[in-house]
Amino acid sequence: MIKKRKQVITLLIYIILIAIIFLADQLTKAGIRNNVEIGERIQIISNNVLITHVENDGIAFGLKFPGIQYLSYIAFLIVLWLLISHIRKEKPLISNYIAFSLIIAGAIGNLFDRFLHGSVTDMIMVGIKGYYWPIFNVADSAVTVGVVIFLIASYFDNHKEEIVEE
């Protein structure tokens, strides 16, 4: 009984984290859509960090191909499945909860844009000496950080198991 209660409380904490990231993503996108013209650039740090309004109807990095929306839905379902299977583990890693929360929040944020607007609003442009990373948003950042946390935690978790087995 106590274990179930603890799982529910933990899950609620991560649902709140997902909601906060989703809201931050949607508020920044709405702010950009309402205040910055498409293609307009606003310098934040010299020419290295800019805010620019882009509507992306492709996937990551603006890649486009037929049926792209289905890939987004499948990826989202896979992440949900991973989260659910992780919750059912005997001793789930907190870092994985955080990672999955970030990934899910970002995925929901971008899927919400696709449903509501038909494209995803991107606005953060980072580069140096005229070479720029593809423009991204808060949701993209959340997904990227979530994946990095998951990979690092998985590496150390697997490495720990190898040490114990020796």
Image (cartoon, helix red, strand yellow):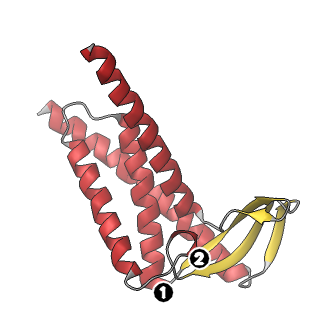
Packing grade of label 1 (10 A; few <14, some 14-19, many >=20) is some
Determine the image quadrant of residue 140. Answer: bottom right
Packing grade of label 2 (10 A; few <14, some 14-19, many >=20) is many
Residue found at the very far front of the displayed protein: 166
Disc sitting over residue 118 in the figure: 1
The answer to whether marks 1 and 2 mark residues whose Cβ atoms lie closer than 8 Å is: no
Residue positioned 33% across, 72% down in the render: 73
Q: What amino acid is found at the position of numbered circle 1 in the picture?
A: Gly
Position in image of residue 166 (x %, y %): 27, 13
Left/right placement of residue 75 relative to residue 33 reads left
Is 48 situated above or below 38?
above
Position in image of residue 165 (x %, y %): 25, 16
> Element at badge 2?
strand
Disc sitting over residue 30 in the figure: none
The N terminus, quarter of image = top left
Determine the image quadrant of residue 91. Answer: top left
Residue found at the very far right of the displayed protein: 46
Left/right placement of residue 139 relative to residue 19 reads right
Position in image of residue 37 (x %, y %): 74, 84
Disc sitting over residue 121 in the figure: 2
Residue positioned 51% across, 64% down in the render: 23
Residue positioned 50% across, 85% down in the render: 117
Left/right placement of residue 98 relative to residue 28 reads left
> In whole angstroms, how far apart are the C-alphas of marks 1 and 2?
10 Å
Between 47 and 159, the one nearer to me in the picture? 159
> Element at badge 1?
loop
Position in image of residue 149 (x %, y %): 47, 41
Q: What amino acid is found at the position of numbered circle 2 in the picture?
A: Thr
